[in-house]
Image (cartoon, grey):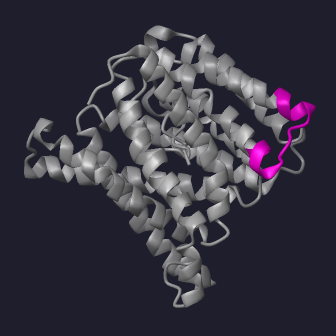
Amino acid sequence: MNIQSRPVATLLLVLVCAIWGIGFVVTEHALGKLTTQSLNALRFALAALSLVPLWLATRKARPRSSLEGYGALWRAGLGLGLVLFVAFYAQTEGLRFTSVSNAGFITGLCVPLVPLLAWLVFKAKMTRAIWMAVSLSTLGLYLLTGGTASAPNKGDLLVLLGAAGFATHIVLTGHYARTLPAITLSLVQMLAVSAYSLLASYLLDVDQSKTLFSTQAEHWQSLLSLDIVLAFFWMASLSTAFGFWVQTSCQRTLPAHQVALVFALEPIFAHLAGALWLGERLDGWGFAGAAAIIAGMLVAELGDRRSAQLHPADLVAAPAPPGNCDEASKT
């Protein structure tokens, strides 16, 4: 099903950005019940399950792959999944130590980081607008995190690492998505992130009482409480599966620069959600930093409309994002 109306496509993208922004609050709530690794393992397993109907619905439109094609698909999916696993671990763990508002705006840094990494890895052209965007975003990060480099917040650093991971994922996904089926590639990545996270939880989580390996009946009862079930429905079905369908469909109707402009709303929604449900407030320097980061995102995507590129498979990171940065970042 494709979305033909531009106003409807724009409104749906705004809705998805709101879902991703609120997802930061939802994820922080769920972190009280599970370790980061187990949370991501369950989240991505459910996200993969939510994406199966879309994968089945589009199977007739997909060309049949040879054994060599399947091998390339799995190699790309497992490799990209590893990058996504690191990015989501850093972002989710960072939420334990920083505010939802900071996490939302810092995750937005992946937008100007994408062309910077593309320049470093693939020698892509760096325009003057991109250098300006990187400068604005760096200034914004400095102001948002307190205007001091002497005592950086652990959570902010972890979320920044996550943003760099999402940017790396987008650059690599943009390379592979041109030759591999986007939905199948996304499904493989989700399964890979879930498997990596489950293995990491088993090997690295010292306290197993808040993992998926817990044998305590009270723990499993708490995971089946209505608020936690709704939290995972939000993270897996809405943020990932629904968000993927909306982004993929809307990018066939809207120009890339308009999609990018709407995506700049995600960190704003994250801040509003943090203020409404958690009572978080930015001070004057924080607002200035947030504004600089938003400006950097817009300059990065709108500085040269002819070169603006958004890839549907980016949402696999989603949002966090998000996804996604574009996807992502998304929580």
Q: Can residue 16 be seen from the camera position used here? A: yes
Q: Position of residue 15 (x, y in %)?
A: 53, 33
Instruction: Tell how many labels.
Output: 0
Assess whether residue 86 is covered by the magenta stretch: no
In this view, the residue in front, 322 or 167, is: 322
In this view, the residue in front, 44 or 19, is: 19
Residue drawn 50% across the image and 78% down it: 212
Quarter of the picture containing the N terminus is: top left
Q: Position of residue 105 (x, y in %)?
A: 70, 37
Q: Can residue 184 be seen from the camera position used here? A: no
| Left or right side of 34 for 246 | left
In this view, the residue in front, 168 or 231, is: 231
Which residue extends farthest front? 226
Residue drawn 73% across the image and 48% down it: 100
The quadrant where residue 249 appears? top left
The quadrant where residue 284 appears? top right
Q: Is residue 217 above or below residue 247?
A: below
| Left or right side of 330 for 124 | left
Residue drawn 18% across the image and 53% down it: 71
The quadrant where residue 296 appears? top right
Q: Position of residue 226 (x, y in %)?
A: 56, 67
Magenta residues (range):
274-288
Q: Is residue 249 above or below residue 67?
A: above
Residue drawn 57% across the image and 72% down it: 225
Q: Is residue 186 above or below residue 302?
A: below
Dominant secondary structure, magenta: helix
Q: Position of residue 116 (x, y in %)?
A: 56, 28
| Left or right side of 23 for 326 | left
Assess whether residue 280 is covered by the magenta stretch: yes
